[in-house]
Image: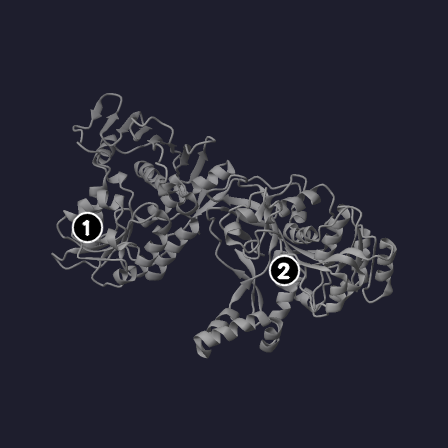
Amino acid sequence: MKQVVQNYKSGELALLDVPVPGCKPGGVLVRTAYSLISTGTELMKVSEAGMSMLGKARSRPDQVAKVVQSVATNGVPATYRKVMGKLDSYTPLGYSLCGVVEQVGDGIDDVKAGDLVACAGNEHALHAELNWVPKNLYAPVPDSLAPRHAAFGTVGSIALQGVRQGESRLGEVALVVGLGLIGQLVAQLLTASGVRVVGADPDPARCELAERLGAAACGDPASPAVESAVAELTNGHGVDQVYLAAGGGSNQPVELAARLCRDRGRVVDIGKCRLDLPWNAYYEKELDVRFSRSYGPGRYDPAYEIEGRDYPIGYVRWTERRNLACFLDLVARGRVDVEPLITRTADFDDAVETYRRLKDGDLKAVAVLFRYPEQVAEDGPSAHAPVMSVPAVPGGARSSAPVRAARTPVRLAFVGAGNYATSMLLPHLAQRDGVELSTVVTTTALSAANAQRKFGFREATTDLDAVLGDASVDAVFVVTRHSSHAELTRKALLAGKAVFVEKPLALTQEELAGVLDAVEESGNDRLQVGFNRRFAPLLQEAGKRFGTRTGPASLRYLVNAGRLDHGSWYLQQGTEGSRFAGEGGHFVDTASWLLGADPVSVYALAPSGNEDLQVVLGYPDGSTATISYVTTGAAGFPKETLDLVADGKVLRLDDFVRSSVYDGRKRWVSSRLPKARDKGQSAELAAFVRAVRTGEPMPVPLRSLVATTTATLAVRAALAGGAPVTLAEAR
């Protein structure tokens, strides 16, 4: 995707190709329709980037102080490298946009794919084709509001918060100094609340615009017109509030505020102007000076903005998000009119040239919008079936490893030694000839020591890097919590190890892309995901008895998952993903193995009020697989039952205890009932160890692992959009 960036050292502006952000839990992935240039804040940043190093230092004394402190702490060379590294890098621009929800992260239930939202934040509402936006930094757009107008949401919230800080009351008089974008919106908001407004700005066109939009009188602050208007409207007492919405290095705004404000009036700083307060003037009137911090309460609080922890409305009535929703409502109801503020709407591809014209003064504007290539129509978002790309497996990766010397044991390291590792994997490996359990790595020393004592690991440690750097280790097992799988897999692949990672391989498309990037970078594709059911003896035998299909098949897979115990880490969806994201790959892989292909579409439904899912997978030959993943069933009913129907035959699997095949003339039933359910872990581990020892291909092709993971991730998008998701192979 494309994004507007700037190099603060050189001042270079560019429309850069960057990766698509992943859709993390607690937020939504938004495809931008319109984004708004803040002609004050952003142009100030663009202008600063074009200054000399001395000029930059003079404009940011706060940053100079940090550099001085760093020199005292770390020395000149280290500080120089740090500062130059930060300066000589691309930084984003933008913080106010409107777009269509493309994908919904876990924990989000107030919007769905296809909804129109306004977004805020200088890290999340960027001039980019796609942005991930956390919950408290977006708000749904009212049906009657055009997307180009909703793009004003963030800037409007800044103006609205400034007005709230002024505590204006019906019938009062206010002075707005600076009639740029923020000042124009402040003036309209005050007028809408019954306050008479006087505006001050040296630009006659901006004064005329403000008067046309409701201001009582406007003029150049250096002329007597403003002072005369204030005296007339206030009977000589002075205005009740002054809103400083100007920028620059002049001290004129604060001096004007002192002169025209009434006794014990309020002065609210919204912009970034010089604030050398004339002490006598402010003291004698006992003026109340207030600052308005951006969009409202919650700004700069990571717990609110990133983690999504809202402030109780009884304690904090107007937060960032509530301000955003309020401003959108005011525009939708016609109380604020933003259309006259739009000087130009530029195509996003012309972003760099637009900034240049603004900076050079060729384009004089109050507000400029970027219109994106796939922007929504003015009458609302267009409905279309979402498409999710199945990442291409990197070329050039090796499909086999060097053949090992005869009788040399395969040395294995385990990262994680929790319940699954110690009950379902390690007992099989500890008894296997030709395997040496080399090292176990855990985050706590005691759990590593326990695993070492029980299974005979040669070493126990908490140092992952030491294991990855150990040339004697042939393969690494990643058996940790879901949120760490992708990153640990990536590191192990880059270290040249064969990797066995428990499901899931990744919780987001971004994580999956990171794993594949590691494969491409290292040339190492020696990867296996713990999709063990395809290795189960009963299912293997039943598949052979069923034989080759000639026509499409219908597969039904009932998973009676049951409820989790309170406190289970599986319930931590914000960090560990949904239950299906963590476990669903098992069932997708089993269905795909039985049908002999990777899915090409995913559709999902979920009843409200519980975690039950109906997932329908489509396959290239017309076959379908329906996975019913339920948590509300009876505890005594078998966990997994599967039926495959095709060509006049039926294959049935009963919870890995019994399997049957009916072909119309006779019925075959598995000849033995295992004492314990064998879901294929032992056979899967044997195949993995054999591949590591001999250098033959991994038991499951990487292409299949990627397709299964993508299909599992697509369930969330299908739920959010209410439509099938097409899985398109990346080109």
* Residue 486, placed above or below residue 496: above
Q: Is residue 252 visible?
A: no
Residue 641's tag is: none
Residue 350's tag is: 2
| 3D distance between C-alphas at marks 2 and 1 | 56 Å
* Residue 183, placed above or below residue 678: below
Count up the numbered dots: 2
Rendering quarter of residue 397: bottom left
Q: Is residue 727 visible?
A: yes
Amino acid on which disc 2 is placed: Asp
What sort of colour scheme is used for the picture? Answer: one colour
The numbered mark, 2 or 1, whose residue comes first in the sequence reads 2
Residue beneath disc 1 = 690
Q: Picture coordinates of residue 416 (x, y %)?
A: 28, 51
Q: Nearer the viewer, residue 210 or 103?
A: 210
131 sits to left or right of 451:
right
Q: Picture coordinates of residue 34 (x, y %)?
A: 63, 51
* Residue 306, placed above or below residue 564: below
Amino acid on which disc 1 is placed: Arg
Dot 1 surroundings within 10 Å: few (below 14), some, or many (20 or more)? some
Q: Picture coordinates of residue 443 (x, y %)?
A: 30, 54
420 sits to left or right of 198:
left
Dot 2 surroundings within 10 Å: few (below 14), some, or many (20 or more)? few
Q: Secondary structure at mark 1?
A: helix
312 sits to left or right of 265:
left
Q: Secondary structure at mark 2?
A: helix
Q: Nearer the viewer, residue 85 or 63?
A: 63
28 sits to left or right of 631:
right
* Residue 45, placed above or below residue 139: below
